[in-house]
């Protein structure tokens, strides 16, 4: 059975943006603040370092029943028995990842426009990441953000649950959720916060409030 998961508050890690603090510290604090999912994203690490970082945070997440998703690297996910992978449009195809990982792992797929839903809606995946909602300094290579209206369109037309990513923080989180996404995904709003626990708690409260109203 695939593990159950909540996309409510999905932390994507970035060690360069963590103000010199370890990933363990950020993740421990964010867990206390109420995150529901973690994606380990290591764009510049060696394979050995990637595996090392994953093994550092895996027990914290296991203890708290929070899924650990690996960005891009199916081999790393398999090596550390992660709960799943997140794939973009230029990463390994989901079919191959599903064959390698089996039916019990979570697969997330990035969706950047409505057209990409034609394939995604037929795919054996578990969620989509709608990206990017807003432009963000965290990922400078991105073009312009989708905006709220396009984000809502993708969320509504998707057969899979969705999480929005890109430039989301406490000032716009409610607006993003009101478009119909199941959750929000953030990097800097938690990793670069002076107090990651308080930042996660604040976002979690906004999410609970927004879900109560909808
Ligand atoms: C939750 C979530 N959504 C989208 C992305 C972006 O994935 P991708 O397009 O593969 O880009 P990289 O993160 O690999 O640079 C994501 N990571 N997580
Ligand atoms: C990892 C990632 N992927 C994106 C995409 O749109 O594909 S935006 C992004 C980073 C989001 O960072 P922040 O929460 O600091 O804006
Ligand atoms: Mg990717």
Image (spheres, rainbow, N blue to C red):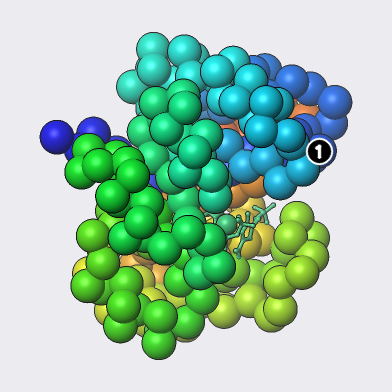
Q: In this view, does 211 lie above or below 123?
A: above
Left or right: 143 as drawn, with respect to 65: right
* Residue 209 placement (x, y as % from top left): 38, 47
* Residue 206 placement (x, y as % from top left): 47, 46
Which sits in the foreground, 157 or 32? 157
User: Image quarter for residue 20?
Assistant: top right
* Residue 61 placement (x, y as % from top left): 45, 21
Q: How many marks?
A: 1
Left or right: 18 as drawn, with respect to 171: right
- State the residue at coordinates (49%, 14%): 60
Left or right: 110 as drawn, with respect to 14: left
Q: Is mark 1 within 8 Å of ligand 2?
A: no
Circle 1: element type: helix
- State the residue at coordinates (77%, 69%): 141
- Looking at the image, which residue sits at the far right? 20
Q: Is residue 96 above or below residue 103?
A: below
- Looking at the image, which residue sits at the far bottom? 115
- State the residue at coordinates (65%, 46%): 187
Left or right: 125 as drawn, with respect to 86: left
Residue that numbered label 1 is attached to: 16
Pick the quarter of the image with the N terminus: top left
Residue 180 makes an appearance in the image: yes
Mark 1 surroundings within 10 Å by alpha-carbon count, few (fewer than 14), some (14 through 19), many (20 or more): some
The quadrant of the picture showing ligand 3 is bottom right
- State the residue at coordinates (68%, 40%): 42
Pick the quarter of the image with the C terminus: bottom left
Residue 11 makes an appearance in the image: no
User: Image quarter for residue 132?
Assistant: bottom right
């Amino acid at each position: 059975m695939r593990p159950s998961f909540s996309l409510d508050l999905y932390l994507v890690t970035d060690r360069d943006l963590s103000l010199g603090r370890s990933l363990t510290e950020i993740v421990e604090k964010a867990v206390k603040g109420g995150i529901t999912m973690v994606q380990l994203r290591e764009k510049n690490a060696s394979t050995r370092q990637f595996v090392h970082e994953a093994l550092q945070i895996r027990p914290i997440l296991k203890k708290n029943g929070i899924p650990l998703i690996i960005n891009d690297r199916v081999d790393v996910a398999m090596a550390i028995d992660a709960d799943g992978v997140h794939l973009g449009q230029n990463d390994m195809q989901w079919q191959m990842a599903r064959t390698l990982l089996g039916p019990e792992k979570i697969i997330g797929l990035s969706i950047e426009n409505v057209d990409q839903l034609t394939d995604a809606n037929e795919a054996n995946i578990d969620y989509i990441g709608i990206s990017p909602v807003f432009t963000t300094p965290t990922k400078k290579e991105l073009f312009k953000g989708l905006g709220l209206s396009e984000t809502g369109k993708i969320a509504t037309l998707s057969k899979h649950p969705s999480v929005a990513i890109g430039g989301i923080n406490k000032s716009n989180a409610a607006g993003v959720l009101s478009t119909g996404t199941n959750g929000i995904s953030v990097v800097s709003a938690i990793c670069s916060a002076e107090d990651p626990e308080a930042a996660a708690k604040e976002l979690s409260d906004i999410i609970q409030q927004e879900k109560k109203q909808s």
